Image (tube, helix red, strand yellow):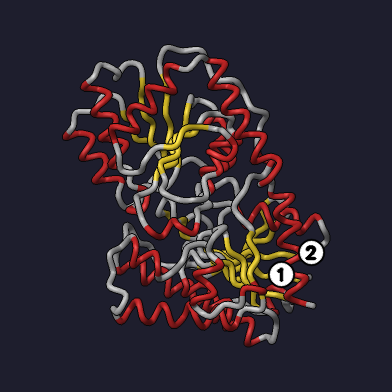
């Protein structure tokens, strides 16, 4: 098959960001398929132009055997009108520039939805070239804006997005969801349950070193590596750090927050206002380097704000990276789908509760070295057995074959 994957924010391992489609494409290429990932050259994580030289509108590139088509889009910073312009620009250029003359005639087009405009452009391309459209649902738009952003469900912009969402469900030959419980939501919006396949995020064992035991040290390093956005609710980490500092734990437990996002400047200001000595903020790290950094942790933070949105589950890249790094995870998410608890790979904490998070960090700090290592290794074994991208690529190949049969 000649497969086009449209994902605005896709990146290879040498860039910070999500490498899901790179890893899936790599395994599909090994199975004899031709795969092109169409993405923006402006990196969503670093907010920098990465892949194009001045004057270039697009460029074909090959990374690790996977072909990328980079499209230029305008820069932005934060959740502003400029970001919406970036989204619309990407979608417009997908529809205008991506063609069989450039990539060969597709057999199937997969459109991923970090936002709906990109998936809509993929659906329009599929209609233009009379090939099946596979809709990959990463986040539930516009429900995320209602539940996390506080938008009224009757707002005209929300109504427009819901119209696009329903259209994409109807038009898709197959639907992929990353969220284990999302099928009910999709069915209410017009998707046929028989068309929906669950393919979560996962790990690429080719990129991951063997697990290393944590260092024997008197200081417990609790690490967060990921987006600093509204949904992440990282304020609770600063409040827990403040409680620990007030109670004499500042030298025993420290927090490292790695990454970027629209909320980072306000988080840094809050840390300064609280005069925290046990919190550090660090820049994003490319995927190919992240596991070296994660190995420096003694425990990890999986934090999300309380929201009804998560009743359908979550599937963030960082959770799988944490678990494969063989360290305990402090899981602070209100969801019925808790793989940390299922794997017995950490402690569950009520989201938005700094006191409970501080107590959980102390509990991890007071565990023996051997207990923490055993807990972390249970997480490693769980994701190796269930969430390897080589296994997930088999599922994706099956879905794509169903779409084209």
Residue holding disc 2: 33
Please name whichever residue, 65 or 329, is drawn nearer the observer in this view of the structure. 329
The residue at 48%/24% (across/down) is 298
Q: Is residue 293 visible?
A: no
From the top left corner, tell me how far across and down residue 163 is, in percent. 44, 83
Which of the 4 image quadrants contains residue 69? bottom right
Rendered image: mark on residue 3: 1
| Nearer-N-terminus badge (2/1) | 1
Circle 1 SS class: strand
Seen as rendered, the residue at the extreme left is 273
Please name whichever residue, 127 or 67, is drawn nearer the observer in this view of the structure. 127
Mark 2 touches mark 1? (CB < 8 Å): yes
Residue 216 is left or right of residue 204, and the answer is left
Which class describes the residues within 10 Å of circle 1: few (<14), some (14-19), or many (20+)?
many
Circle 2 SS class: loop
Please name whichever residue, 187 or 3, is drawn nearer the observer in this view of the structure. 187
The residue at 36%/41% (across/down) is 350
């Amino acid at each position: 098959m000649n497969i086009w994957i449209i994902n605005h924010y896709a990146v290879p391992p040498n860039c910070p960001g999500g490498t899901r489609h790179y890893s899936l494409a790599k395994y599909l290429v090994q199975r004899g398929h031709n795969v092109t990932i169409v993405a923006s050259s402006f990196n969503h994580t670093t907010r920098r132009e990465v892949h194009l030289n001045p004057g270039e509108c697009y460029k074909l590139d090959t990374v690790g055997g996977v072909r990328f088509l980079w499209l230029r889009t305008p820069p932005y910073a934060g959740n502003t009108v400029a970001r919406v312009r970036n989204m619309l620009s990407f979608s417009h250029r997908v529809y205008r520039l991506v063609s069989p003359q450039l990539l060969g005639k597709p057999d199937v087009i997969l459109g991923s939805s970090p936002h709906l405009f990109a998936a809509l452009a993929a659906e329009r391309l599929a209609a233009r070239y009379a090939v099946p459209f596979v809709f990959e649902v990463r986040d539930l738009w516009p429900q995320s804006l209602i539940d996390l952003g506080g938008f009224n469900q009757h707002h005209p912009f929300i109504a427009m997005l819901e119209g696009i969402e329903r259209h994409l469900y109807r038009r898709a030959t197959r639907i992929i969801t990353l969220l284990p419980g999302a099928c009910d939501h999709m069915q209410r919006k017009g998707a046929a349950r028989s068309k929906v396949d669950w393919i979560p995020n996962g790990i690429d064992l080719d990129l991951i070193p063997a697990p290393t035991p944590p260092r024997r040290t008197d200081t417990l390093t609790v690490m967060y590596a990921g987006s600093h956005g509204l949904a992440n609710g990282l304020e609770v980490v600063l409040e827990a750090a403040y409680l620990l500092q007030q109670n004499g734990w500042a030298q025993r437990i420290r927090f490292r927050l790695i990454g970027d996002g629209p909320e980072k400047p306000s988080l840094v200001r809050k840390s300064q206002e609280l005069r925290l000595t046990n919190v550090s903020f660090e820049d994003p790290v490319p995927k190919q380097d992240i596991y070296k950094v994660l190995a420096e942790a003694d425990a990890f933070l999986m934090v999300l704000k309380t929201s009804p949105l998560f009743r359908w589950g979550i599937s963030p890249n960082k959770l799988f990276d944490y678990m494969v790094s063989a360290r305990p995870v402090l899981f602070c998410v209100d969801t019925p789908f808790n793989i940390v608890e299922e794997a017995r790979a950490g402690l569950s904490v009520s989201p938005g509760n700094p006191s409970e998070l501080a107590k959980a960090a102390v509990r991890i700090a007071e565990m023996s070295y051997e207990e923490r290592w055993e807990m972390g290794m249970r997480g490693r074994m769980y994701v190796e057995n269930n969430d390897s991208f080589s296994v997930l690529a088999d599922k994706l190949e099956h879905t794509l074959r169903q779409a084209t049969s």
